[in-house]
Image (cartoon, rainbow, N blue to C red):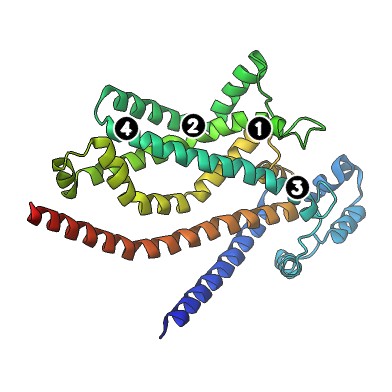
């Protein structure tokens, strides 16, 4: 079997797995949403539901497609979904794609910036702690980082709003921009500051501590002795050798962390009333907006599953690379020691 056939077979297998996972996810969410207490008619008609007669309620359910058994409703929904039609939002009374489309960009901006900032600072913090291992600096950073990680994100968000929005009036407490300033980049950045702080403080130490330990494990390997005997400084060894050798591991961790960062983004959106798909998901569940909730769950599922596939692909590429890298390192170390 040639390489091209192997790659095509692997891609086909993953595509089938992706489709199966999305179908299973849609079924689970579809039935759980309908088992939840509450009436979706309340979302569509509001308080007018209370004054409707039994016949009017039946006709209303029929117009919205809620009169059929659940399995029939699901078949209708999945059939329409394959044609790109995800139904009408019960709360907003417009197609759900029109509700979601303007908000996806906001979530991607907040999540994307948070993702980059978290990992940039995590790597820098890990290097700093590794350089000053077991010093007062390292111990303080470890304790402060652990404490920050265990602070609930929603509580931290409320405290930041109280300090910087209410007391100091420095930063806005909600929204993605002020009214009429959607094109003002500076105004958008001001609205990102507090959610971004919550995201960074909630996730930074989790990854920084992981990278710190990886760096220290690498620093204790045998080939480091040769680097020390050459007179290389600790900072050179950690940055030029240890960091380079654990880079594939860092990349792998970054790939599989997307769902973790995404879930944190949803929480930040809910806390700061930031208009994104996370805050919209909470709202759609609250108002039993089935069609909107289904689309949002599918979008989230696509992002999570794709990130998992990417992480798996990276790991498959990394495994042989690591073996070759270790062999080359030992060969070089043996050669250097024999020349001495």
Residue 169 is left or right of residue 24, and the answer is right
Label 3's element? helix
The span from disc 4 to disc 1 (Cα, nearest Å) is: 30 Å
On the image, the x and y values in percent for residue 323 come to: 27, 63
**Badge 2, how many Cα within 10 Å: few under 14, some, many 20+?**
some
Q: Which of marks 3 and 2 precedes in the sequence?
A: 3
Residue denoted by label 3: 102
Note whether 184 is above or below 308 in the view shown.
above
- As drawn, which residue projects farthest toward the front? 339
Count of numbered badges drawn on the protein? 4
Note whether 282 is above or below 10 in the view shown.
above
3 or 1: mark nearer the eye? 1
Q: Which of marks 1 and 4 precedes in the sequence?
A: 4
Q: Which of marks 2 and 1 precedes in the sequence?
A: 1
Q: Nearer the viewer, residue 122 or 18?
A: 122
Tell me whether circle 4 and circle 1 mark residues in contact (CB < 8 Å). Answer: no
Instruction: State the mark number for residue 201.
Output: 2
The span from disc 1 to disc 2 (Cα, nearest Å) is: 18 Å
- Measuring 70% from the left and 52% from the top, which residue is drawn there? 293
């Amino acid at each position: 079997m040639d390489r091209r056939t192997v790659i095509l077979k692997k891609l086909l297998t993953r595509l089938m797995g992706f489709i199966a996972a999305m179908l299973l996810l849609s079924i689970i969410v579809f039935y759980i949403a309908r088992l939840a207490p509450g009436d979706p008619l309340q979302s569509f008609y509001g308080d007018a539901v209370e004054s409707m007669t039994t016949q009017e309620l039946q006709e209303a359910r029929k117009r919205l497609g809620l009169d059929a058994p659940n399995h029939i409703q699901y078949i209708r929904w999945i059939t329409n979904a394959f044609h790109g039609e995800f139904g009408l939002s019960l709360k907003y009374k417009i197609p759900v794609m029109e509700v979601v489309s303007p908000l996806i960009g906001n979530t991607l901006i907040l999540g994307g910036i948070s993702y980059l900032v978290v990992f940039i600072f995590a790597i820098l913090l890990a290097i700093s702690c590794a350089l000053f291992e077991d010093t007062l600096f390292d111990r303080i950073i470890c304790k402060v980082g652990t404490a920050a990680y265990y602070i609930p994100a929603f509580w931290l968000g409320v405290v930041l709003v109280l300090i910087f929005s209410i007391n100091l009036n420095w930063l806005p407490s909600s929204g993605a921009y002020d009214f009429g300033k959607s094109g003002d980049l500076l105004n958008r950045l001001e609205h990102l500051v507090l959610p971004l702080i919550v995201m960074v403080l909630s996730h930074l130490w989790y990854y920084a501590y992981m990278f710190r330990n990886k760096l220290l494990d690498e620093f204790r390997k045998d080939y480091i002795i040769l680097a020390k005997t050459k007179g290389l400084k600790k900072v050179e060894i950690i940055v030029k050798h240890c960091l380079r050798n654990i880079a594939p591991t860092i990349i792998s961790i970054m790939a599989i962390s997307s769902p973790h960062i995404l879930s944190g983004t949803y929480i930040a959106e809910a806390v700061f009333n930031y208009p994104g798909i996370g805050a919209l998901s909470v709202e759609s569940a609250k108002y039993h907006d089935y069609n909107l909730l289904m689309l949002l769950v599918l979008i989230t599922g696509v992002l999570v599953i794709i990130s998992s596939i990417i992480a798996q692909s990276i790991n498959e590429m990394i495994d042989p690379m690591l073996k070759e890298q270790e062999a080359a390192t030992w060969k070089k170390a043996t050669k250097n020691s024999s020349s001495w």
